[in-house]
Each structure stands twice: as C-alpha cells, then as structure tokens.
Image (cartoon, rainbow, N blue to C red):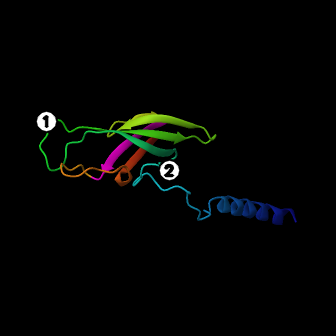
Amino acid sequence: MQKTMRLVLPAVAAALVLTACVTTGRQSPFPDGSNVALGQRAMVDGPIIQPVKVLEDSRCPMNARCIWAGRVRVQMLWLRPNGETRSFDVTLSEPAPLADGAITLESVRPDKQTDATIRPEDYRFSFRFAGGL
C-alpha cells in the first residue's frame, strides 16, 4: 500500500502542475496597443492606457519640405489596477515613465498632409511598454 502511495502522489502532483499551465482561452477585454483611437482603452504589455486628446501635432506634412520634423504630444490616462486613473502626456518616440517602466508612443497615423486636416476620430496610435519584473 505504501509503495502504491509513493507512485500515486508524484503522479497526482504532476497532474496538478500541468493543469496550472493550461490556458483558459480567454483574451484580454482590451485590444493591444498597436492601433488605438482617441478615447479607446488598450492593454499595452501590462498597463491599461487611454489616449484622450492630441495636444500637439506639428509633424511635417508628407507632401512638404520642412526644416523641423515636428512632434506629436498626446494627453493620456493610465487606468490603474486599483481603479484609480492617472493623467500623463506622451511625445512621439520619447519614453514616458509609467508604472514600473516606460511607455513609448511609437507611431501616429494618418500621415499629415498640407491639403487635409486630420479629424480627432481619424487618429490611430501605436504604443510599446518596456518594464515590469
């Protein structure tokens, strides 16, 4: 009987460990940070963020010649796990401190044109978060 228990206990322990590794198939209720619109919440490698407002879009239009490339600044919200929100700003290609790392606004679409105005609802942003343990 003791010999049987010695064989059964490791098998049961192994089965429990393996079932802990099984995924539920559920996905995050938020999209990732690759194509985020103003007002849309997204999970970016951990933190949940929401772009709120374009504060500045001084990018050089694609069909123009400029001395300065310009920049884009976006007002953001960080939706913390405890339910609180924190406001912060991001600037295109500049890491901004967030949580235990930094978030970077990697791209802004559509490209700016001299003969067209970008409406707020047309903006799409891509973000990357670097940090965590």
Furthest toward the right, the residue is: 1
Q: Is residue 113 magenta?
A: no
In the rendered structure, the answer to whether residue 11 lies left or right of residue 96 reads right
Comparing 120 with 78, the one in front is 120
Determine which of the numbered discs, if any, sits on residue 51 in the image: none
Q: Residue at x 59, y 65 (%)?
A: 25
Furthest toward the left, the residue is: 65
| SS type, badge 1 | loop
Q: Is residue 105 magenta?
A: yes
Residue bearing mark 1 = 67
Badge 2 or badge 1: first in the primary sequence? 2
Marks 2 and 1, how far apart in space?
35 Å
Q: Residue at x 34, y 45 (%)?
A: 106
Residue bearing mark 2 = 41
Q: Look at the picture and state if 114 lies above or below 19.
A: above
Q: Position of residue 26 (x, y in %)?
A: 59, 62
Q: Position of residue 113 (x, y in %)?
A: 20, 50
Name the quarter where the N terminus is drawn. bottom right
| SS type, badge 2 | loop
- The secondary structure that dominates the magenta segment is strand
Q: Amino acid at mark 1?
A: Ile
- Res. 7 visible in picture: yes
- Res. 99 visible in picture: no
Residues in magenta, as a range: 98-110
Q: Residue at x 20, y 39 (%)?
A: 69
In the rendered structure, the answer to whether residue 29 lies left or right of residue 95 reads right
Q: Position of residue 32 (x, y in %)?
A: 46, 54
Crowdedness near tag 2: few (<14), some (14–19) or many (≥20) residues, C-alpha within 10 Å = many
Q: Amino acid at mark 2?
A: Arg
